[in-house]
Image (spheres, coloured by chain):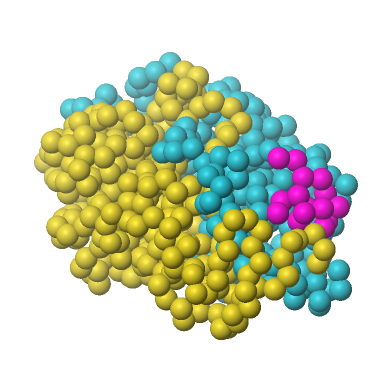
Chain colours: A cyan, B yellow
Amino acid sequence: MKNLKYSHYFLWTTLAITGTLSCKPPQTEETGPANTTKKEATGAIEITPENHDDKMSSVLGTPKHNIRSIGILVYDGVNILDVMGPRYVLGQVMGAKTELIAVNPGNIKTVMGVELVPNTVMDSVDQLDILVVPGGFKGTLLGAYDSRIHQWIKKIDQTSTYTTSVCTGGWILGAAGLLKGRKATTNWYQAEEMLKRYGATFVKERYVNDGKYWTSAGVTAGMDMSLAILNDLYGENYTQAVMLDMEYDPAPPIKGGSPEKTVPEVYQMMEAMYAMGIVPLLDSLDGVIGK
Amino acid sequence: MKNLKYSHYFLWTTLAITGTLSCKPPQTEETGPANTTKKEATGAIEITPENHDDKMSSVLGTPKHNIRSIGILVYDGVNILDVMGPRYVLGQVMGAKTELIAVNPGNIKTVMGVELVPNTVMDSVDQLDILVVPGGFKGTLLGAYDSRIHQWIKKIDQTSTYTTSVCTGGWILGAAGLLKGRKATTNWYQAEEMLKRYGATFVKERYVNDGKYWTSAGVTAGMDMSLAILNDLYGENYTQAVMLDMEYDPAPPIKGGSPEKTVPEVYQMMEAMYAMGIVPLLDSLDGVIGK
């Protein structure tokens, strides 16, 4: 092994093995063979088993809230990227357990067909420090009218530190009554009208926070929102560590990603397509709910 | 339902229901109740069951290659976002089947613990139009030394239209011998040295293509690469449609995401952490392989 500058190392924690900051809090020492060979660091940081807690804390800072539990609600028809962006980013909150919480028992069929195994179900979870409600399409609209989901979200919200949504997940938070009188954002499709249904004021931003309520625009905005939450919690060093881990320095090949940056014929086609899926459902659900 | 401008619609295809372009190719008509009520479009696009193929083709264009099969290799320790970015973007290639292909039977434990259900296994797949090899950390390095994976990748590569990698997935393509003499990129950690091991020349870009070989930088660069492939295949209208669907107009809360944009103390800490996981493995594997 000639190209790399290292020779002997101890397996400090599974942090390094898994490539994530979160898998073990730095406070625990139960991992890896207890090889105490001193690390020869290339940079200014020399990390040993004796100093790693202090070194990491000095670089990463101390969070302003003690976050121990993070839950992402998952349901059939949830958008896989709405889930996985926050799962990846918030999963790096050190010392916190991050779980995919299903509405019903069984595996989850996400919107494009990827099948996930959730960690637990809604009925088994009474408290979370961070709640993420991701969006989707048909499944989300059904969720937005499901009183069992509303009740659970309201219960969790009573003691959460952050209550958040990604994309059309904002419709569910809205329908649960949590966005009333608040500023919020959601997926671009009829964003203002949809939020108005729930008494919220649409703000055209990538993510919006109003107190502890954080909402994001469509799908990939969940990553930006999650990074902003991390930034709120820990400050820039921590956020930079996670951004470097995910090499998040985005460079799309062309401009786009918002109605304004999309050529009108493409935008109109997409709007028509979305409408064809959503509007009949809204019609039928309005009939049921009498809204 | 007063806030929306629509009244009656037919369920055109499951495209709209699922919120994706890919679930059914527009050529098929097997979906939805055959309600032929004419759609009252808001924009310039009026889509009816009779004209929808033509309308969509005229907006979205015709692909330069006929892509029918897309496969993403998954293995224990794969990075969930390396997988899901391309799954979401390339899953929107109309008429193509997109599958998660496992190295071994059974569910996949991704790097941060999310459990996925793959669609099929490597031994059942002989041909793909697009192959995506995502990265991870320890599991990826083991994959980079697994001759069964090399053989399968080389077989698929013989007839693929695009052979691609995300993040450290480039180490696997490299170890299979496919990047020899080519320009490529990979995750930032020791990128140049790692690619040199496999005879490739590191180019510091978000994604790099050398002929049909497309490689991307770390984790989230897989989304940019996948969009660039879509753009190569279909051109800008199609890419814009997908970018709007995923609202990909990224706005990270702070700058970062590359070694250059990260403050030195954070960068050095991350490099030290990565090294502690990777270097002992490289040492042991070098011993086995005698590299």
Percent position of residue A29, x then y: 51, 40
Q: Nearer the viewer, residue A134 or A184?
A: A184
Percent position of residue A95, x then y: 61, 42
In the rendered image, the vertical position of residue B251 relative to residue A17, given as above or below = above
Percent position of residue B261, x then y: 47, 22
Q: Nearer the viewer, residue B260 or A16?
A: B260
Q: Which residues are magenta?
A: A190-204
Residue B258, quarter of the rendered image: top left
For the point 32% across and 56% down, which residue is it? B63
Relative horizontal placement of residue A247, taking residue B143 as reference (left or right):
right
The N terminus of chain A - image quarter: top left
The C terminus of chain A - image quarter: bottom right
For the point 48% across and 23% down, which residue is it? B262
Is residue B158 in the magenta section?
Answer: no
- Extreme-top residue of the structure: A44
In the rendered image, the vertical position of residue A38 relative to residue B212, given as above or below = above
For the point 21% across and 34% down, which residue is it? B183
Is residue A192 in the magenta section?
Answer: yes
For the point 60% across and 82% down, which residue is it? B35
Relative horizontal placement of residue A263, taking residue B101 as reference (left or right):
right
Q: Nearer the viewer, residue A57 or A214?
A: A214
